[in-house]
Image (cartoon, rainbow, N blue to C red):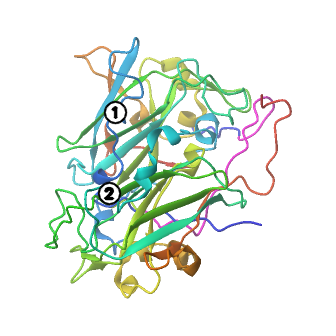
Amino acid sequence: MTAKLTPSQTVGPFLAIGLPWPDGPFVVPEGTEGAIVITGIVFDGAGDPVTDALVETWQADQDGRFAHPDDPRGAASPGFRGFGRCPTGPDSAYRLVTLKPGALPSPGGRTEAPHVDVSLFARGLIDRVVTRVYFPDEGQANEADPVLASIADPARAATLIAEPDPGALGRLLFDIHLQGDRETVFFDV
Amino acid sequence: MAVHPPTSGSGLAVPPYERPSGVHPPLDFPGYRSTALRAPHQPLVLLPHRLTEITGPLLGAERVTKADADLTAQHEGEPQGQRIVVSGRVLDSDGRPVPGTLIEIWQPNAGGRYRHVVDDHPAPLDPNFTGVGRCVTDSDGRYRFITIKPGSYPWRNHQNAWRPAHIHFSLFGRAFTQRLVTQMFVPGDPLFFQDPIFNSVPEAARDRLISRFDLGLTVPEWALGYAWDIVLRGRGATVFEQPGGHR
């Protein structure tokens, strides 16, 4: 017997009362050895910052493992939450503290470059939009990544690669553009 | 250079989740004005389900207390409004329950006002109502909230626009692919016809957002009851196990 899927609806403008958690932005505690910061601004089609969005992330640990029973390699020991959640506030930026994930094996014998899956929710998005963050110091792995390779236009694929912050080691900038010349690649997941 | 990634092959077996069609609203829906500057213009790129997509955060009991499921008991006094029980099951589309999964809800008070600084609807705040709840589904995928019936509110999307009464629901399921944020409506609301958010859903799927009055869920002489099941994406009829893959 199959059941019929429940449709998506927007989070609306008031998600901030229901979804943010005090520890949401901290996939690992601030100050954890090897921690990195992923931060950025979400822009709408007019180039204005979106101040009422929620950015959520999901990723493997540093060894490329998931603490999840459906990982066919077996679940990694729990301890790394892998999940981050940060609203874009009045300053319009989100900021997540995490660890850089490891590369992942992929069906067919290929390897996925280290990446973070991202869901973005906001007023005006009737369904979440999904994107990925890749890492700027993984040039070779990014070249071989099957998802980046599936994006025909290299300029578009480049929207998924975070930029190092020249002023801060371990800090990566990843702006999300919902529309416009620099529209981020979004996935049908 | 478009190289299409393999979706199957020897070695690692990653059974994908079903891909819904005719269920979710289109991102670009002009009747809902906020989509105009926010819905992406470029076509979405197909993302085959691999390890990151078939896993997901398994957050549960450690994030909730029992009190989080009763929105009428979070303050010294009781909130104004009609007490209701909202209960149902979280299932996947193969009909299997989704146990131990976190559900988060938020809603306005009985007068249609959210406890949020940006909500300037001139209805009073209720000092006894925050409008935020959480719970974790039981082993049968069942959840149960006690709350008050949310009010409708105006929202300036079009001339004299009013939202039908609704409660926001956020669900994780067990995989990134199953993540869902939606809204639950109550049956018989007179405002459905003019609500572009509700009507953005393909017509055949719209009534899945409307809960059902259920006398069996009422608490006699205390609260009305509404039943609403939530169905997340499953893996289709042909789920296969990787031999020796699970430990």
Q: Assign the magenta stretch its main secondary structure.
A: loop
Q: What stretch is highlighted in magenta?
A: B7-27
Residue nearest the viewer, comparing B101 with B22: B101
Could you tell me which residue is drawn at 45 percent across and 40 percent down?
A: B63
The residue type indicated by label 2 comes to Arg
Could you tell me which residue is drawn at 25 percent across and 63 percent down?
A: B114
| B142 shown above or below B175 | below
User: What separation in Å lies between label 1 and label 2 (alpha carbons)?
Assistant: 18 Å
Residue nearest the viewer, comparing A41 with A23: A23
Residue B168 falls in which quadrant of the image? bottom left
Helix, strand or loop status at disc 2: loop
Q: Where is residue B98 in the image (x, y as percent from the top left)?
A: 64, 52
In reply to whether residue B23 is colored magenta, the answer given is yes
Determine which residue is flagged by label 1. A174
The residue type indicated by label 1 comes to Phe
Using the image, name the chain to which the residue with label 2 belongs.
B
Helix, strand or loop status at disc 1: loop
Badge number at residue B38: 2
Residue B133 falls in which quadrant of the image? bottom left
Seen from this angle, which residue lies furthest right? B243
Could you tell me which residue is drawn at 22 percent across and 59 percent down?
A: B115
Q: Position of residue A145 (x, y in %)?
A: 58, 29
Q: Which quadrant would the N terminus of chain A be assigned to in this image? A: bottom right
Q: Please state if A186 lies on the left or on the right of A65 as rendered.
A: left
Q: Where is residue B74 in the image (x, y as percent from the top left)?
A: 32, 55
Instruction: Evaluate whether residue A118 shows in this view.
Output: no
Q: Characterize the local packing of mark 2: few (<14), some (14-19) or many (20 or more) Cα atoms within 10 angstroms.
A: many
Seen from this angle, which residue lies furthest top? A33
Q: Please state if A3 lies on the left or on the right of B238 as rendered.
A: left
Could you tell me which residue is drawn at 46 percent across and 66 percent down?
A: B26
Q: Please state if B22 lies on the left or on the right of B111 as rendered.
A: right
